[in-house]
Image (cartoon, rainbow, N blue to C red):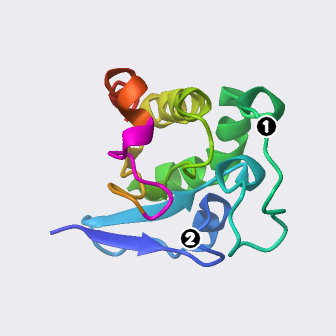
Amino acid sequence: MIILLGSYHNNAADTVQFLNAPHDDRVVYNFHCYEPLKFTHQGATWTPDIIPGERMKFEDSETSEAYFEELFSTAISTAEKYGTTLYCGEYGVIDVVSAEDSLKWFKVINKVFSKHGISRAVWNYKEMDFGISDSKYDCNREEILKYL
């Protein structure tokens, strides 16, 4: 059995640092990542600060390995300090983003996850705006699966 322990503010990576030290070796620190939100949630009507009709290309999102390294840095150092591991229990890109731009985002974030041994699960498997198995990815499914 594994115990996933997350923090506040939508389970954000930068709040892992505020979790208590685990008292059980089965505790894994859990966080979610949909950053940068203006890219991953473009068109979302349920998210404040997102303009539903606004669209952004990957190249305009400022997404890079350095971006995710900085974003995850406190979570990584906290997990190392307490001798536990990290798990990103949700991450993904909304379906209005092109398959090509989504692939670029997955490639970058997963490179950082792999570098730091962060386990992960894409949100979500099918439909509901973030489906990884939806027809949107038919054009590059084999390629995107390399980065999950």
Q: Nearer the viewer, residue 99 or 72?
A: 99
- Measured in 3D between alpha carbons, the distance from the residue under mark 1 to the one under mark 2, in whole angstroms, is 22 Å
Secondary structure at badge 1 equals: loop
x 51%, y 76%: residue? 20
Amino acid type indicated by mark 1: Ser
The answer to whether residue 140 of the structure is visible from this angle is no
Left or right position of 141 against 31: left
Q: Quadrant of the N terminus?
A: bottom left
Q: How many marks?
A: 2
In the rendered image of this protein, does residue 82 appear above or below residue 140?
below
The magenta stretch is 128-136
x 45%, y 39%: residue? 136
Q: Are marks 1 and 2 in contact (CB under 8 Å)?
A: no
Task: Please identify the residue farthest to the left as the structure is shown.
Answer: 1
Q: Quadrant of the C terminus?
A: top left
Which badge, 1 or 2, comes first in the chain's sequence?
2
Left or right position of 114 against 18: left
Give neighbour class at mark 1: few <14, some 14-19, many 20+ (Cα, 10 Å).
some
Q: Which mark is residue 71?
A: none
Amino acid type indicated by mark 2: Asn
Secondary structure at badge 2 equals: loop
Residue 83's image quarter? bottom left
x 51%, y 62%: residue? 31
For disc 2, the marked residue is 11
Left or right position of 9 against 108: right
For disc 1, the marked residue is 61
Q: Is residue 18 magenta?
A: no
Residue 48's image quarter? bottom right
Front tag of 1 and 2: 1
Residue 143, given in percent of the width and then of the height, sits at: 38, 21
